[in-house]
Amino acid sequence: MSARASTGISTPAILLVVAGLACQEVGAAIAVLLFPSVGPLGMVMLRLVFSAVVLLLIARPALRGHSRSAWTGVALFGLVLATMNGLFYLALERLPLGVTVTIEVLGPLVLSIVAARRASAWLWAVVAFAGVVALGGGGWDRLDPLGVLFALGAAASWAFYILASARVGREFPKLDGLALAMAVGAVIALPFGIADAGSALLRWEIIALGAAVAVLSSTIPYAFELIALRRLPAAAFAILMSLAPATAALAGFLFLGQHLSWLELVGIALVIVASIGAIRSSARAARETAEPLA
């Protein structure tokens, strides 16, 4: 058996994860271009509505046979989805794409450090902090303070998203819980999106681009990730996902002309390194907990 096979690493699966990340950031870039027409909250509504429609058609979730606790979990998950996406797009309106995604990644990064329960894991917290300092090294005055607060809110929401997703995943089979939660999130976002977008929602090209953002940012990445997770170890998958800040910075440069200073690029690199280190520490701690003492 080859070394590649023994470690469970599959090149096609890796390419799927990378392609999913690319689609996600291209979708975010298109969303930024739509902000002048529909606003960030209008964009959130379009993304959640179309994502919910696609997921409901695919999953066709059963509405009966679930406990009150299960429905409470779905409602909370939907609220987290609406909040996370809303804060992310509000941040994206004020900050470069690469910077926004880098700050957002701090949420799951902190969760990984806490989950590791190892003193060495806090080294990665220091590295991440250094990355954040470097991120503002190009001039904190260049970063909109409200945009940073929105991005930090999105980071916290992402951590809650992971916890809420795990809870719903235990209560509902396959994609059922996600589809129902996405529908709840779409309903929550609806009034805010209509107020923000206004008459722009009557233009077919705006609706079509909103659908494209939903497919690129949600449907394709989730499908690719689902396939990749069957062929990759969870830790390897998480490490690949931690490259999101780099793909976001590249997408921002290519599609939006967003240039970052060398210090900001160093900051992004440090946060990525911290994410990978924290994931590896968390995975190692999980293995040690699972293994019986000799």
Image: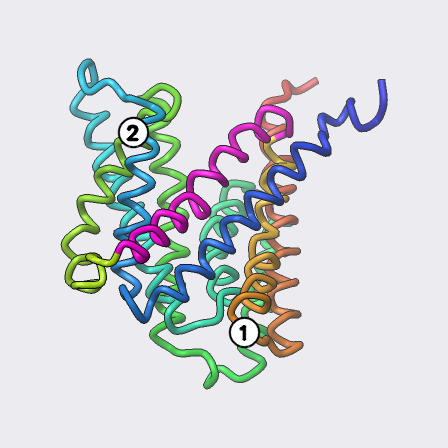
Label 2 SS: helix
Residue at image point 54% right, 69% down: 132
Q: In terms of image quadrants, where is residue 6?
A: top right
Pick the quarter of the image with the C terminus. Answer: top right
Residue 165 colored in magenta in the image: no
- Up the image or down, 41 lies above or below 234; here it is below
Task: Please give the residue where the numbered disc 1 appears in the rendered image.
Answer: 258
Q: How many marks?
A: 2
Residue 56 bears which disc, if any? 2
Between 255 and 48, the one lying in front of the other is 255
Pick the quarter of the image with the N terminus. Answer: top right
Q: Earlier in the sequence, mark 2 or mark 1?
A: 2
Give x and y (percent) for residue 26: 51, 55
**Quick one: label 2, few (<14), some, or many (20+) residues within 10 Å?**
some
Residue at image point 38% right, 77% down: 145
Point out the stretch of residues depicted in magenta.
Answer: 204-233
